[in-house]
Amino acid sequence: MKIIIDLIIAGLTLGLTYVLTSEGLWGSAVMFFNVLFAAMIAFNFYEPLAALIDQTGINWGFSDTLCMLGLFCISLLMLRMTTETIAPVMVRFPMPVYHAGRLIFALGGAGVTMAVVILSFHAAPVHKMIFSTIDYKSKPPFGLGLDHLWLGFFQYETGAVFSRLGAGQRDPYRTYGQGGRVKVFDPKAEWLLLHQDFRPYGVETTLGDEGAAEAGGAGGAGAGQGGQAAPGAGRPGGRGRGGAPGAPP
């Protein structure tokens, strides 16, 4: 089953790469940055937006996934429309640069897109082993770890950008200096672990029974039979623990 999931993810990534290469070097480069910024916008704001949705009383469990993908698609569409207006024509490049450049940028854009899709499944109230194969330590496809790479990149970039002091998640390892007081996304690199423990179906935990219960309690989750959280209850570690930099804890 694992090889099938890896092949599907790899096939979709290569398919997106092929589509983006048709944009040429200039178009694929612009789309790469559109995808990159859209993904950063989505990860910065999806948790606060999901909290607002849950406050309406819906609490259906898919708020994080819906907001993550919704923000990503809307941001990408707006950025695409903006760049098409600002730069509507292609730029000519030498042929070797043209072919190598469009492949590199297309592959990068496809990789970021698939990372967001994979992480949206991690945030959904599904089985702890997604598609019976993917857990926190899996690195789909074929060990590349697109989801791990994106989380690491976003964590580092938020630590570099959100450097002001104040309330919010701090850097416990002082990677960015300033006495570890820099705001940073997922400061303990536990996003994948917490989301696996919080997914309501299955028994595969990363923190053990006590750790999973503590994570669920911190998120305000209601416990069902076997200590599993109800599908729509709370969030891993509470709003702000693994969320947008500066989000209220």
Image (cartoon, grey):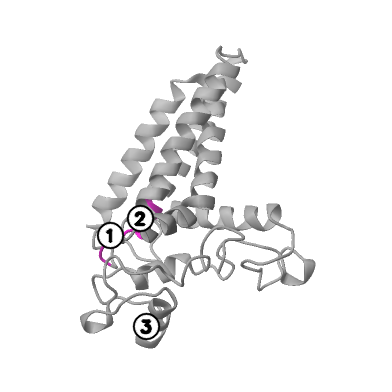
For the N terminus, the image quarter is bottom left
Which region shows up in magenta?
A: 118-127
Residue named by callout 1: 60
Q: Could you tell me how far apart the alpha carbons at marks 2 and 3 are, in whole angstroms?
A: 22 Å
Name the residue: 42% across, 78% down. 215
**Relative to residue 209, is residue 191 drawn left or right?**
right
Image: 25 above or below 54: above
Label annotation for residue 213: 3
**Relative to residue 102, is residue 205 drawn left or right?**
left
| Amino acid on which the number 2 mark rests in the picture | Ser
Q: Could you tell me how far apart the alpha carbons at marks 3 and 1 are, in whole angstroms?
A: 20 Å
Dot 1 and dot 2 residues touching (CB under 8 Å): yes
Image: 238 above or below 207: above
N-term mark: 2 or 3: 2
Q: Mark 2 vs mark 3: give the one in front.
A: 2
Residue lying farthest to the front in this orientation: 56
Name the residue: 56% across, 28% down. 29
Question: For the residue carrying disc 1, how many other residues have a C-alpha within 10 Å: few (<14), some (14-19), or many (20+)?
Answer: few
